[in-house]
Image: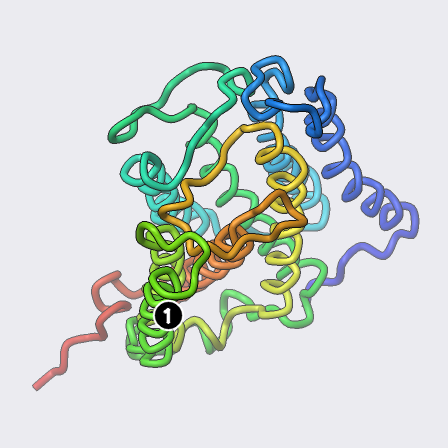
Amino acid sequence: MRNPSRSPRLSSLLVVAMLAMIVLPAALTLHTVHLSALKPATATNPYSSPYGYTVSTLLFVVPILVIALWFVPSEGVRIEKKSFWCTIALLFPIGAALDFFFARYFFVFPNAGATLGVKAPALGDPVPIEEYAFYLTGFLCILLIYIWFDQYWLAAYNIHGEAVERRQFQRLLKLHPESILLAVILIAGAILYKRHLSNEPVGFPGYFIFLSLTALVPSSALLPSARPVINWRAFSFAAFFILLISLLWEVTLAIPYGWWNFRSEQMLGIRITAWGALPIEEVCLWIAVTYATVLVYETIKCWQSSGKPLRHALFGEPSST
């Protein structure tokens, strides 16, 4: 097992750097705010937080740069580059599709002054270019944080690339009925709640259903193979880290200053009053995204470690009869 650096000086600097990679972009983002969120019409005032959404993407960009350019090389953490980029190539289009196909149904962007003003294509109405940057950097940040926790902080629980669990399998695609059942229960429950119990009964809970499918469709096919090789401790820390950043981002800044908000007709109607009426879907979002990212990455890593052709890795080798 690789031994992490035990230099007291380096260890203390690492803690400082971890704090700085959150504090610095948070401070720069907060500095864009010129008006109190308590003042009327702040969310639609273009001068309340000029370029706030643009600058806030540093909350993902800075950790990406610090982890990729400092933490990973200095501690000898090995990133399986092909698995890494295959995961991003598979998942980023899902985030992009959320904006391209569904932004007009799910989201509103009331404060144009918080962005560069560059519009990106989407069906119905274009969206701020920051939206696509948000999802790309989000997936990159999640994956780097998971790998870093997996191979450095929680390396004792890491299943290394040459382990038997990664190389010896019949096929990677295996049905997981519990994920399918959970998806059915969540979707049916969301529809019934929206129609009969919600304070916002008009519409359809499309956003919650999209998030449920994003997490549980990969789970229904990949979880049995990926579960033995996922570092679940690293996953839990990565999910907590991302959830903490997202809540700081949305509750403190995005919703009060109108960087984005949500169309009530496509939400469940469960909102957290103390957090600016944040829809419960946003608490679920980054947990679901982190789960799907780790699941896909570890599955691809198994395929790469096995040396099998993709078709044989996914579906099994043909019988020699």
Mark 1 surroundings: few (<14), some (14-19) or many (≥20) residues within 10 A: few
- How many labels sit on residues? 1
Q: Residue at x 62, y 61 (%)?
A: 150
Q: Which residue is mark 1?
A: 189
Q: Quadrant of residue 33?
A: top right
| Nearer the observer, 126 or 59 | 126
Q: Amino acid at mark 1?
A: Gly
Q: Is residue 299 above or below residue 205?
A: below
Q: Residue at x 56, y 47 (%)?
A: 278
| Nearer the observer, 289 or 6 | 289
| Nearer the observer, 8 or 266 | 266
* Name of the residue lying farthest toward the right: 8
The quadrant of the picture occupied by the C terminus is bottom left
Q: x, y (%) of residue 250?
A: 60, 40
Q: Do we see residue 143 in this rendering? A: no
Q: Is residue 28 above or below residue 175?
A: above
